[in-house]
Amino acid sequence: MTRINSNISSLIAQANLGKTQKELQLRLERLSTGLRINRGADDPAGLITSERIRSDIQGISQGIKNSDRAASVISTTESGLTEVADLLNSIKSLIVESANSGAISQDERQANQLQIDSAIDSITRISNTSSFGGLKLLNGSLDYTTSGLSTSAISLARIQKASFVGQPSLQVDVDVVASAQVGALYYNGGTTPPGVTLSAMTLQVTGTRGVEVITIPSGQPLQKLVEAVNNLTSLTGVTAELVNGDPNSGLVFKSQEYGSDAFVSVERLQGPAAGSDAWTLYKYASNGPVETGTPFPWSTLIGAGTLVTGKRDEGQDVSALVNGNLASGHGLRLSINSTSLGMELLLHEDLAIRPAASNATFYITGGGALFQLGQDVTALQQANIGIQSVAASQMGGTLVNGSLQFLSSLKQGQINSIDTSFSRKDFSAASDILDRAIDEVSILRGRLGAFQRNVLETNSRALQSSFENLSASDSQIRDADFAFETSKLTRAQILASAGNSALLLANQASQQVLQLLG
């Protein structure tokens, strides 16, 4: 049958030609953009996955840039610290030279003092001027700020890292669980008569600084022995004092420093054997006293076996919990390095020797350098580090005769200048402060170097690997396969040409009806 109102063949040809034209447009679009997914309709699930991957790629790309910039900041900081270290070493040589008092004149020592002053001023200048893009690096701007820090409990706090995620400040609780102790040997002074040396004696006194020999005649008050020991403290590192200030109670030989590295040794070289004139030294059988400042109960402790005879005794490092974590102790110093907190503390003696004392509490309220190293803004993808000031008034904190002294105290007119030290013939305090400052700079450089090498550089390499893999994954999902798309384009072109021919033939078939009309 022949109909002209509905040309079904033409409609079929038009429909198929329309599909072919859409296919042809799709292939041309993909070949022109290079993308398989140009809109959500192309692949809804693939688009969602691809966009998420692209978000990760952008975050990772910025994380790599952040790591590289952070590495530049650390490198610039260390370059300033290198100059500070060189200046400290030059000060060291000047102090050692000035201590050679038998071969150096007052004028030369004053010239050395001028050089020391100039070097200390230069250290402070470097602290104030070292910067990166307007960011001050060594003046304490990148150090942490604290509040509630009582110097009667904690003499010095150096915060290395702190995490404030989810809280405006970080509370720090320090609970001493084992006391810091000095090495101590006790002498009860005999009983007939008490408070004096019963016979002439020669004592060899040894401490962390060295060994010296003391000779005491018989019948001398124990205070004379105390004075003889204390006159040599700078050479031995050993002090002596009367028990409870009473010569009848005996005396105690103590190491000048606290900690397991400190020790005291007293040995009688000449005189009657131990016991023949009540010359017997005692030490604690285990740990020393956890409290001081109370009368020493000689008879009770000896009778109870708490004290045993001995010629040598070592000190003990302080042990404490910091926010519930056991911190490493060295003398009066504590250090802790956890995921959220890293710091070094110099405890005051009043806290370090008293485990029964109340906890010391302070707050870290802000500051520090925060580096965003990953694609997500979370604590796990951030690194915190504190860079302390290297100004002379902040470095070398050392307890000198119970007072905390810094590098600035080595300048002319200050308590530890070489002119002042020469008047006492004792350069040990200046040397201790300088050695501490050198250690602080070296440790800071090492800490920054470890941070750059083990955190920043490894993070950059890990992110670069992730960037490559995610880019490959996104390409596999989103990018067009040109070989495949070209073959599909060729097929669409052939079908479009064939469809046009078929539509032409279908339209021509309807015109044949005119032949029936004559």
Image: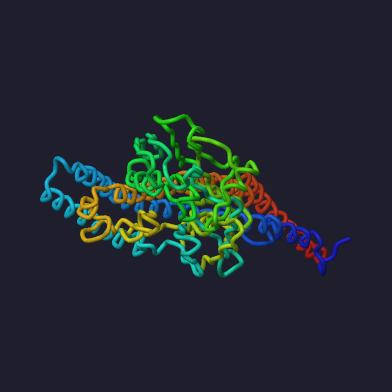
Q: Is residue 275 left or right of residue 117?
A: right
On screen, 184 above or below 345?
A: above
Q: Residue at x 71, y 57 (%)?
A: 45
From the top left corner, tell me how far across and down residue 478 is, in percent.
62, 52
Looking at the picture, tell me which residue is in the foreground, 57 or 294.
294
Q: Is residue 192 above or below residue 293?
A: above
Q: How is the image coloured?
A: rainbow
Place of residue 423 in the rendered image (x, y in percent of width and height, measured from the top left):
21, 52
Q: How many numbered marks appear?
A: 0
In this view, the residue in front, 426 or 412, is 426
Tell me: residue 368, above or below residue 96.
below
Q: Does residue 467 show up?
A: yes
**Residue for point 54% across, 41% down:** 283
- Above or below residue 10? Residue 92 is above
Q: Is residue 183 left or right of residue 425?
A: right
Residue at horizontal 59%, vertical 48%?
A: 470
Image spot of residue 275 (x, y percent): 51, 33
| Near-viewer residue (349 or 62) | 349
The quadrant of the picture occupied by the N terminus is: bottom right
- Identify which residue, 17 or 285, lies in the foreground: 285
**Is residue 500 in view from this perspective?**
no
Q: Quadrant of residue 353?
A: bottom right
Image coords of residue 447 (percent x, y): 44, 48
Name the outermost residue toward the right: 1
